[in-house]
Image (cartoon, rainbow, N blue to C red):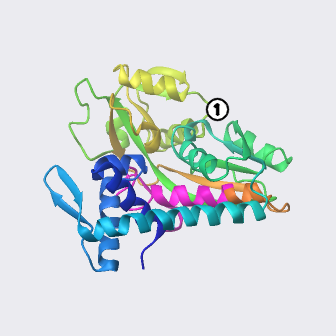
């Protein structure tokens, strides 16, 4: 069976005449879009595009399908809008808390999609550390919160429902412009990391606590180049060659000035969870936001996504 996602991909490729540009507009990895189109062609039993090097054009079947696909997508959008109105999603407010490291990745994608689907709903975003967000949830100041836990984090309060979404590897980042201190290794040990000048995050980061505990357990003490840095500053220091720092993989994505190397210790991860009060029902607006967060994080862990080598569904461990 063909899906709306496949039709959306088909229409965008037909519009741009280019798989890579279409994938960028749809916020997909190019291989994922290619698989969608191939699956659509198999479902319909016809080729939709002539694929020549540097030139993509519609076949006769593709040209016939294009107006039909546009009508189907328009009808789906109309149905979605009418059902949203019935569900009370033409207006309202959803209150979302997030940790600072999620604002440029998952949350940005969620908010863009939410505004497109529910333009009449206001979104209030609060950016705080996980411990503060848990407190805000418990006191009813937020509907939902994306919180981050590491192996050293304290458990969330019992009143909260916490749904793990994805588990993310931690990576060492160094300057892409300078020599590679890890000689192109696919993954490095804590001992290799501790041999380099190290940029420490501020001590209120759970990640700082987790890395301090890991170094202590291994009997290691890296030479500290800078201590007490906020995340953006630590990334900038690494780009300038001041030292190596450890960050979640998605924080380093899209920064060409950084070289990223995985840590070989598979226990050094963080889990991103969606938290809410278990004793309070979600509003329609908040429930729609929860569903969209699940959708976006599922795409982030799908094969072919830019983050796939570094993240996995939390259910996969």
Q: Residue at x 24, y 31 (%)?
A: 180
> In the image as oriented, which residue stretches furthest toward the left?
53
Q: Secondary structure at mark 1?
A: loop
Disc 1: which residue: 204
Classify residue 268 as left or right of residue 282. Answer: left
- Image height of 5 relative to 134, above or below: below
Relative to 38, does residue 98 appear above or below in the rendering?
above
Residue at left offset 67%, top offset 55%: 289
| Residue 128 or residue 120, whichever sits in front | 120
Quarter occupied by the N terminus: bottom left
Task: Confirm whether the magenta stretch covers residue 98.
Answer: no
Position in image of residue 10 (x %, y %): 36, 61
**Residue 88, horizontal then vertical, whole percent:** 79, 59
Q: Quadrant of residue 8?
A: bottom left
Quarter occupied by residue 59: bottom left
Numbered range of the magenta stretch: 289-317
């Amino acid at each position: 069976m063909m899906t709306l996602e496949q039709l959306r991909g088909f229409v965008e490729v037909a519009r741009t005449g280019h798989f890579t540009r279409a994938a960028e507009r749809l916020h997909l990895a190019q291989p994922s879009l290619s698989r969608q189109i191939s699956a659509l062609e198999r479902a319909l039993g016809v080729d939709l595009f002539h694929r020549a090097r540097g030139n993509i054009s519609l076949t006769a079947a593709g040209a016939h399908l294009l107006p039909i696909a546009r009508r189907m997508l328009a009808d789906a959008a109309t149905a979605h809008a009418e059902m949203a109105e019935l569900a009370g999603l033409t207006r309202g407010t959803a209150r979302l808390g997030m940790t600072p490291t999620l604002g440029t990745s998952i949350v940005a994608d969620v908010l863009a999609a939410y505004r497109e689907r529910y333009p009449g709903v206001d979104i209030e975003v609060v950016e705080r550390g996980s411990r503060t967000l848990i407190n805000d949830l418990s006191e009813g100041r937020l509907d939902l919160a994306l919180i981050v836990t590491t192996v050293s984090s304290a458990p969330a309060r019992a009143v909260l429902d916490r749904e793990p979404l994805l588990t993310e590897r931690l990576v060492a980042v160094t300057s892409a412009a300078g020599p590679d201190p890890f000689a192109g290794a696919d993954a490095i040990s804590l001992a290799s990391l501790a041999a380099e000048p190290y940029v420490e995050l501020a001590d209120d980061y759970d990640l700082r606590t987790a890395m301090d505990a890991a170094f202590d357990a291994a009997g290691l003490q890296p030479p500290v180049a800078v201590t007490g840095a906020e995340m953006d500053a630590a990334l900038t220091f690494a780009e300038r060659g001041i030292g190596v720092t450890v960050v979640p993989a998605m924080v380093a994505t899209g920064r060409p000035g950084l070289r990223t190397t995985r840590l070989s210790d598979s226990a050094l991860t963080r889990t991103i969870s969606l938290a809410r009060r278990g004793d309070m029902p979600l509003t329609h607006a908040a429930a729609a936001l929860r569903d969209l967060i699940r959708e976006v994080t599922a795409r982030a862990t799908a094969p072919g996504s830019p983050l796939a080598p570094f993240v996995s569904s939390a259910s996969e461990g």
